[in-house]
Image: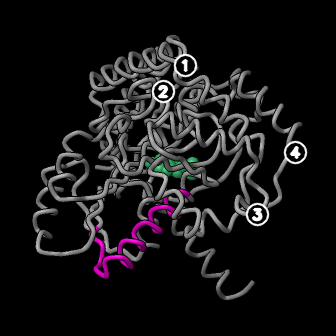
Amino acid sequence: MTGLEIKLREALELLEKKHLKRTVYAPFSGQEKPKNWIDFSSNDYLGLAQDAFLKDRSKEWLSLYGSGVGSSRLVSGSLSPFLEVERVLAHFHGKERALVFASGWQCNVAALSCIINFARETYLEEPLVFTDRLNHASLHYGCALGGARQIRFRHNDLNHLKERLQSCQHKKGQRFIVTESVFSMDGDQVDIDSLLELAQQFSAFVYVDEAHACGLYGPEGRGFSYGKPGCAVVMGTLSKAFGGFGGYVATSAALCEWLVNKSSGFIHTTALPPAVWGALSAALEKIPSMRYERQELVEKAQFVRQKFRAMGLNIAQSTTHIIPVIFSSSAQALRVAECLKTYGIYTVAIRPPTVPVGQSRIRFTLCAFHQWKDIEILCQAMAEIISELQIEEGAEERSSR
Ligand code: PMP
């Protein structure tokens, strides 16, 4: 073993000791999943990943066009049905054009960095990039690759954003505001209209990541940014409510054309396979009419939030189908996730660095495939586990005194 590998082992052991080590394992073997587990960790919010309509279209495109396209979009990997899907995606968001990337992560890194770099090169001034402190890692990497020093505002605090914008008023660079619309780990949502007012007041370019909102919120699931031209770039992922894989931006034709020409994360990678595009084309046909599923999700989420609050659990400022329960330590979050498994409930403990230190949590996500009885099992299980753990903790405290 090399010296570096020995150091790696030591670093991993340290993570383990701090309850921060992550492991890739297969919690369920594909088909077993729906039968044996109630999964409250999935981002398949509309249940489309198992939808027959999507699967059939996916299979159809697989047999029509093959398992892969063998090159990037700019070589021979751009089949005409892909362009049509992007056209429909743009229309879904009410934008001139949409561009699909290999993943949501890659899209944020590739698109955001490219736009920031363009602003710097064009105005010959450092761009001023205002970012929510809890933005997704991919947004941070996009800013970093764009060479921007982020001006962070307190999470979802538009007064603080305003202060930050005011304090930079004397500077000349292009202003950007980068935010999620529904925050991935807290399940709260930005007040998009107030944010857009600020953006207008300070001439800021707005980039909104709607990864957790697209398909679910806004008219026909078109996101909170729908019909709001002030949102210059709407970013979405195809791996959550869309039930497939990939990421995209929906924006102006000029900006898309620029990304096609300058964004390495678009240019220098192979196009997504036809089966993935097929599923996307079917999802786009289906999502606008899924109002019943969206409404049910809102009601179930409201029910769970009320129940959890009544149990005295800390669910932060969640207002959506993403409901975090924040614990005092990573160990406790891990323990509750383990206990939930004995009830047939699958969740995972989310720990730093994904969330801030001291805010380890279980992130419960409600999806259209959950039945009311699943929701009741969840609430009952949490009530029992919490009261049991409190008793145990009390016992530990007593014995340690
Ligand atoms: N943005 C946000 C807010 C996310 O939560 C995620 C994924 N968790 C991404 C982007 C990346 O999307 P993908 O999983 O498609 O790479």
Foreground disc of the pair 3, 2: 3
Spatial separation of the CA atoms under disc 2 and disc 4: 34 Å
The amino acid type, in three-letter code, at marker 4 is: Gly
Compute the Cα span from label 1 to label 2.
7 Å
Mark 4 or mark 1, whichever is nearer to me: 4
Residue under numbered circle 3: 75
Horizontal and vertical percent for residue 328? 33, 47
Instruction: State the separation of the CA atoms marked 4 and 3.
Output: 17 Å
Of the image marks 4 and 3, the number of the one nearer the N terminus: 4
User: Which stretch did the figure color magenta?
Assistant: 107-128
Q: Residue furthest bottom?
A: 3
Residue 395 coordinates in the image, percent (x, y):
35, 38
Specify few, some or many for label 3: CA neighbours under 10 Å numbering under 14, 14-19, or 20 or more: few
Residue occupied by mark 4: 66
Mark 4, ligand 1, within 8 Å: the answer is: no
Label of residue 109 in the image: none
Tally of numbered discs? 4
Name which residue lies at 38% across and 49% down: 208
- Graded by Cα atoms within 10 Å as few (under 14), some (14 to 19) or many (20 or more), the crowding at tag 1 reads some
Dots 1, 2 in contact, CB < 8 A: yes
The label shown at residue 370 is 1
Query: Taking the image as drawn, is residue 327 in sight?
Result: yes
Query: Which secondary structure dominates the residues rendered in magenta?
Result: helix
Q: Earlier in the sequence, mark 3 or mark 1?
A: 3
Find disc 2 in the rendering and name its residue: 366
Rendering coords of residue 123 (x, y %): 31, 77
- Of helix, strand and loop, which one carries label 4? loop
Residue 120 colored in magenta in the image: yes
Q: Earlier in the sequence, mark 3 or mark 2?
A: 3
